Image: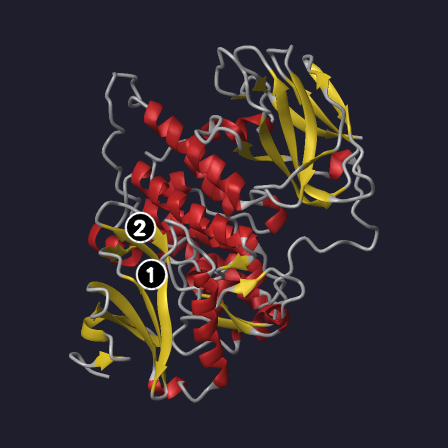
Amino acid sequence: MKIGDTIADRYRLDGVLGSGGMSRVYRAHDNVLERDVALKVLHDKLSDDPSYVERFRREARAIARLSHPNIVTVIDRGQIDSAEFIVFELVRGANLKQLLAERRYLPVREALAIVHQAARGLAFAHEHGIVHRDVKPQNVLVDDDGAAKVTDFGIARSLDRESGLTQTGAILGTADYLSPEQATGQPVTEGADQYSLGVLLYELLTGEVPYPAESVVAVAARHVNDPVPNVIDRRPDVPLRVSQVVGRAMAKRPEDRFPSMDAFIAALEAAMAEAEELRGPEGNGATELLPAVAPAPRQRVRKREREPRRRRRRGVPWPLLGVLLVALVGGAAIWAVADGRIDPSGENGNAAPADEIRIQAARDHDPFGGDGEHPEAVARATDGDPATYWPTETYTSFTKEGVGLVVDAGRPVELGGLTVATDEPGWTALIQAGARAQGPFEAVSEEQRVGRDTTFDLDTGGEAYRFYVVWITGLEGRAIVNEIRAAD
């Protein structure tokens, strides 16, 4: 194909937008609908390989299921001669790799806003059973209005346990953004996307990836073995809350990260709200954050690179080495075998003692409103600090069937009870449960009046649920939740 050709009697190729190991992307004009589009064509040398063709087609099928403002839209797909192609909306702007090349790093609030939008797109994909598995700057586009869109779902996998796609090997990600479980060939869940997005946020804030090294194997080994670097060590003007968000998203064990992408989003929103309130270190009334402090000199990173070299004498773990030896030339991607399952049950079933369950606030729930119930404050309901809280809106007359706060148990469990603490008692509520953060939910407790420390006894009928809702059915003015915790 060359510039000026017309594909499928419809798409005129006007220029090249980019090229990778698997495909080339053209700027094209749709002669039927009279609009510019992006047209992605599988390289000729790969068209005879059924695995690449299937991966390419799977990308079109995956994104076609996902209609969201923060995901690039698929318009069409087809085949011309032996060449497979996909047609996307044309995003006028740049990808994050290009932005970083121009600016080195971004202001705190801009970085948070971009990652927040990308997280919303990925959360929507997760709700539809799809894990991206290759989140990186090249795959996040930012248009001229500042809207971020996730693209390139070519190596995505379904979370559906019945899907054959979870049973075969596939490219699992790019080395600099690889989660530890991907590097070691473990089952990949939505937590892998959260980890990669945490790495991306680190890079947007500091201008560098967290684990630079001389080879793909060394980079992946650092993801597995090295502690999570502190953003503030590299850039002192970053607020502590932002550094904590990055650190938790990049936790080595998936269970130590945010329990869901929705919970990660809530933490980002809380960090953005705090950044808006900052008035400079001296409280001098400035309406903007101080100008970005340049990240520390790169020599500090080189010094830290020596540590994994010493560790390498002990040998790279065999599971990791087995996965990494089949890395693609150039270090762009790594192959592994993983089944993609999420929340697998243990041999002892789903019931668990309350002190072993990590309840995390996931999202506000306002199905009869639409404006939301303070999503920026959701994370405060499980932050361990009884002085902070999540509030509902303030109502002069509460006429809704209810509003609520969704919490995530991290995996499907049979909770025996939930305890709700509040500094403003007197409202009524019950507990609901469901399989997904967006619902649907069903009642698993009786309605009762909430005091300062109230435990709801739950009856799940033997069913295990991952998400539980404090469903507020009656209030005067507002209700607040200081803390929610599992109870036996």
Q: Which mark is residue 138?
A: 1
Residue 137 placement (x, y as % from top left): 35, 57
Type of amino acid under label 1: Gln
Q: Quadrant of the N terminus?
A: bottom left
Q: Is residue 22 visible?
A: no
Quick check: 383 above or below 319? Answer: above
In front here: 447 or 214? 447
Residue 379 placement (x, y as % from top left): 53, 31
* Helix, strand or loop status at disc 1: helix
Type of amino acid under label 2: Gly
Residue at which label 2 appears: 207
Q: Nearer the viewer, mark 1 or mark 2?
A: 1
| Left or right of 246, for residue 319 | right
Question: Of label 1 and label 2, which has the lower sequence position?
Answer: 1
Q: What residue do we see at 47% from left, 30% from top? A: 375
Q: CA distance from mark 1 to mark 2?
A: 15 Å
Quadrant in the rendering for residue 225: bottom right
Q: How is the image coloured?
A: secondary structure
